[in-house]
Amino acid sequence: MPQENECNAIYDLYQEVYEELSDIKHLVYSSIRLVNPESLAVFLSKLLCEKMDQKNNEVWIVSGQNNVIQTAFNGMLVPIIKRRVIGIESSEMMTHVIKKQLVRWPSNDDIEKSLFPAYKLPFIFPIKADSMAFGFYVIDKVTERDISVAQFLSQFYGMIFSISNLHEKVMEQKNELNELTELLFYQNSNLAALHHIGLEVAKSIDLKELCKIITSTTVEKLGAHKAAILLLDDESRRLNGISQNGGLTGIENVSLDIEFEVVFKHALTRGRIINWKDYTRTLRIGSYSIEEWVIFPMGNKNKLRGVLVASVGKKDISDLIAILLNHADLMFENIILFEKLKKSNTELQEALSHVKTLRGLLPICANCKKIRDEKGYWNKVESYIKDHTDADFTHGICPECIKKLYPELSQFKD
């Protein structure tokens, strides 16, 4: 009979250990899925209610470096507006639990009673971590067996909270990576568009055509709402509209005196991009209004040619527009040089058209010295030269002819 009782006791102990191991297995599988500290706090509080019969319990979580916040109470999430906050350095008890990560046994400490008045014998167990506890939980009147389980939970939930923090960091990095990937795809597609546009820009041989390509690309490819180009006239110091896209029809009729247009003057004199955040939300260009604008000076440090005005809204496309304008500036140089060369060639052609020269063999009479023209007529030398060059004649008489024609005058000449 004693042997049978002993076997039954061993069986009961085995059954109890098995159930505890099953509970631990369930605890591991359930906790490992939770990555939010608040969810973990609520789960721990429920576990204390259901498995340890601690109907009166609460879980506190460290916030930042200075405070610990009541997060779960009796298996429920504490509403944010009702959460209590305790400073970690506010008492020796908090330092003992959070920084030293030691269990706080029931005592007659007035601070302890004021913080946890609902507990007859409050036990405070830290949720352990490497340097400072993640928080703590409070239970009431525990047995020796409960203390062992509670100490296990302190270690186990410290590990789960570490996994939770690591998971949050991984998710943050994953989100950052996803955002970076999206940005790279966006930038890549825009750069591909700019490359395609660059080929069109390289073919431009006319300033108006080039400006039209720039404004249409800014709106249709890069996503600006509106865009306009105004070129600077060096003599009058006025900005004259030349091209637009996005509904600024008639911008070609706009002419602005930069001495009275502060925003444009700043962009040109400083040679840098400026936007509405530094001035006013709405920019007036003649009779037009542009919201959330950015002004890009066109040209380089040696020569500013004008401005591109774009309404970009919330889009971050300033860098892409700047890349487009840098590429276009090279074409501006080429087009201006081409225009100068074209003008020089025209002037040269006009000059050459006024120059008449005689080339080749001229048929001339050996006796009278008349010259035969291309129609077969014989002309006096002076008539022929006058008709075929820009030269003209004035008549005089040489010394030999004077002797021959006027011998009586030749002696005076001598």
Image: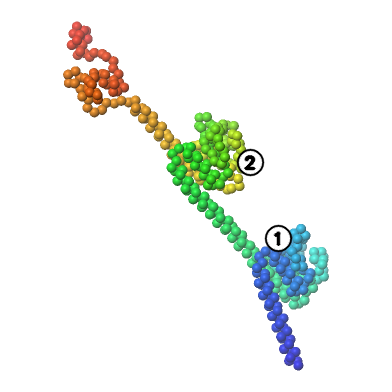
Residue 201, numbered circle: none
**Could you say which quadrant of the image residue 116 lies in?**
bottom right
Percent coordinates x, y for residue 331 in the rendering: 45, 41
Q: Is residue 334 above or below residue 105?
A: above
Q: Amino acid at mark 2?
A: Arg
- Which residue is identified by label 2? 281
Q: Amino acid at mark 1?
A: Ser
Q: Is residue 26 above or below residue 255?
A: below
Q: Is 66 or 267 nearer to us in this picture?
A: 267
Disc 2 element: loop
Relative to residue 82, is residue 217 drawn left or right? left
Percent coordinates x, y for residue 262 in the rendering: 60, 35
Relative to residue 70, is residue 351 drawn left or right? left
Q: Is 161 or 360 nearer to us in this picture?
A: 360
Percent coordinates x, y for residue 190 in the rendering: 52, 50
Kindly identify the residue that appears in the image at 34 percent across and 27 percent down.
353
Residue at the farthest left position? 367
Residue 63, numbered circle: 1
